[in-house]
């Protein structure tokens, strides 16, 4: 195997972002691609096998472009760039950086961080109903929420409805203190958290009081027809088949529906089939319904979460093979 040298210029003002704290990004790329990287006087010299050196140079080119656009380079960026470099998707990080959905109350842009997430967002734009399936940390709910708020701001809908089955509550719901709203609030808290971060608590409270945003348990959907609304059903793996059918038949004109769920984290009793599993089988050939399956490569939480998800997937796979 021939060893080559490749050089890329990194202006001094971007070195800190591109190289990472104590050159941690350089060390990770060196370790993963088996190259040697030497930084001197604004020049980055990459020494290694031809393919590896080209991959490393391409990654640094993308990181430099991200830094020039004012982005902070995260560990997730590095891990994802490394995973993509073997698939020859050279411009993926730049492509993702251009896909801004909206901005949070603090002005931080919300955008997909993986190609899987970008496909998810594109599908939401194209289809009336989208099922987003994947493990924890893949951004299923958060991105759907960002799309809902964008649709509301653009007057594409006049209401956002966020719902979850309160299945975990079971018969214990009656023993919690307070009125019905305070009893179901703990099960809806993740939805509130995302809304507060994107639009701010004050705006959320104001829109809730006006009835423009509604956060409610799934049982509240029965008997209603939901027109001109952006509706998100979260934790759909905890619905029964009857609940899922009830929910999907509430949809009216001008509405868009996102159903999110993680099929590996069901809280239903053992003898109850998940409404999400049934819906995936029944609706797979229906036009205007999109399905996206995210995996551990789309996890954008702490890198350890990605490792945990992967470990559980391998464990489940081994268990299946034994049976």
Image: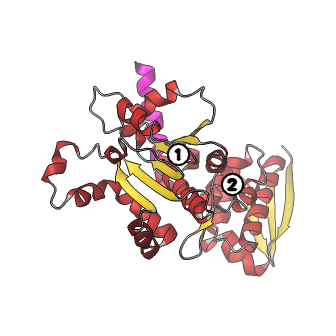
Q: Residue 181's x, y, as percent? A: 26, 59
Q: Is residue 112 left or right of residue 205?
A: right
| Image quarter of residue 67 | bottom right
Which disc is residue 257 wearing?
1
For the N terminus, which image quadrant? Answer: top right
Query: Between disc 2 and disc 1, whose residue precedes?
Result: 2
Name the spot of residue 295 as percent of width and height, x first: 55, 42
Q: Residues within 10 Å of mark 1 (few under 14, many from 20)?
A: many
Q: Is residue 237 visible in this depiction of the protein? A: yes
Report the magenta residues as a range.
308-323
Q: Secondary structure at mark 2?
A: helix
Q: Secondary structure at mark 1?
A: strand
Answer with the quarter of the image where residue 112 lies.
bottom right
| Vertical side of 234 occupied by 41: above or below | below
Furthest residue to the left?
175
The reply to whether residue 110 is visible in this rendering is no
Residue for point 45% across, 68% down: 207
| Residue on which the image places disc 2 | 81
């Amino acid at each position: 195997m021939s060893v080559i040298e490749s050089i890329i210029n990194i202006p001094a003002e971007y070195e800190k972002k591109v190289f990472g704290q104590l050159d941690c990004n350089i060390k990770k790329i060196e370790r993963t691609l088996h190259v040697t990287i030497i930084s001197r006087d604004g020049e980055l010299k990459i020494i290694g096998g031809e393919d590896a050196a080209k991959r490393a140079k391409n990654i640094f080119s993308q990181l430099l472009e991200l830094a020039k656009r004012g982005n902070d380079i995260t560990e997730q960026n590095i891990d994802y760039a490394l995973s993509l470099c073997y698939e020859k998707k050279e411009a993926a990080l730049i492509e993702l950086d251009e896909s801004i959905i909206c901005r949070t109350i603090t002005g931080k842009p919300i955008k997909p961080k993986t190609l899987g997430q970008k496909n998810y967002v594109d599908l939401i734009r194209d289809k009336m109903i989208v099922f987003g399936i994947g493990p924890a940390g893949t951004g299923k709910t958060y991105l759907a929420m960002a799309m809902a708020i964008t649709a509301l701001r653009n007057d594409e809908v006049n209401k956002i409805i966020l719902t979850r089955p309160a299945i975990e509550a079971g018969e214990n719901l009656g023993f919690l203190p307070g009125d019905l709203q305070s009893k179901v609030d703990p099960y809806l808290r993740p939805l509130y958290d995302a809304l507060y971060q994107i639009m701010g608590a004050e705006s959320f409270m104001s829109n809730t009081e006006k009835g423009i945003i509604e956060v409610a348990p799934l049982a509240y959907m029965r008997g209603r027809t939901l027109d001109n609304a952006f509706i998100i059903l979260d934790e759909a793996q905890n619905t029964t088949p009857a609940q899922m059918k009830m929910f999907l038949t509430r949809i009216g004109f001008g509405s868009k529906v996102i159903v999110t769920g993680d099929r590996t984290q069901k809280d239903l009793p053992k003898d109850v089939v998940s409404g999400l599993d049934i819906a995936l089988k029944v609706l797979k050939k229906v036009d205007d319904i999109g399905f996206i399956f995210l995996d551990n490569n789309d996890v954008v939480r702490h890198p350890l979460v990605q490792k945990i998800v992967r470990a559980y997937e391998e464990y489940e796979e081994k268990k299946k093979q034994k049976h």
